[in-house]
Image: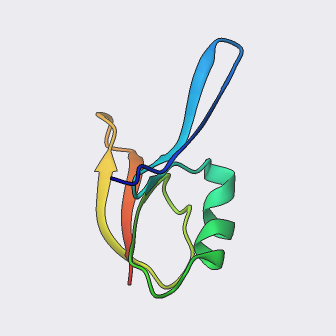
Amino acid sequence: MDEKKVWDQHVDWYWVDAFDKFQFWNDWEVKEKIGARNKEEKLLLITSPRNWIEGGELLETINFLDNTKAFEIIEYQ
């Protein structure tokens, strides 16, 4: 099995950027990475509210207990 792991260690922490087909992006990277992605591949994105670009379909919104938006789940096909 070909495992794809991208990680590093600094200041006594392990930071995982990717494994298998999953990638973890910082909020400030999301829009750029969506724009640069391979359009042939589907993408399921879980991000902060309104932190995505046109072309995706909003599937679900997850709220905090006070009913403010916490995350949005978007699908790009």
From the viewer's side, name the closer residue of 6 and 37: 6
Q: Residue at x 39, y 45 (%)?
A: 68
The residue shown at (29%, 34%) is 65
Seen in the picture, residue 52 relative to 55 is either above or below; the reply is above
Q: Position of residue 51 (x, y in %)?
A: 56, 61
Q: Quadrant of the C terminus?
A: bottom left
Point 67% across, 57% down: residue: 29
Q: Quadrant of residue 76?
A: bottom left
- From this view, report whether residue 48 is shown above or below residue 64: below
Residue extending furthest toward the front: 1
Foreground: 73 or 39?
Answer: 39
Q: Position of residue 7 (x, y in %)?
A: 59, 37
Residue located 40% across and 49% down the image: 69
**Number of dots carrying numbers:** 0
Q: How is the rendered protein coloured?
A: rainbow
The residue closer to the viewer here, 3 or 62, is 3
Q: Is residue 5 left or right of residue 71?
A: right
Rendering quarter of residue 43: bottom left
Left/right placement of residue 74 relative to residue 4 reads left
- x and y, in percent, of residue 9 in the image: 65, 24
For this orientation, the residue located farthest to the top is: 12
Q: Could you tell me residue 17's position as x and y percent?
A: 56, 43
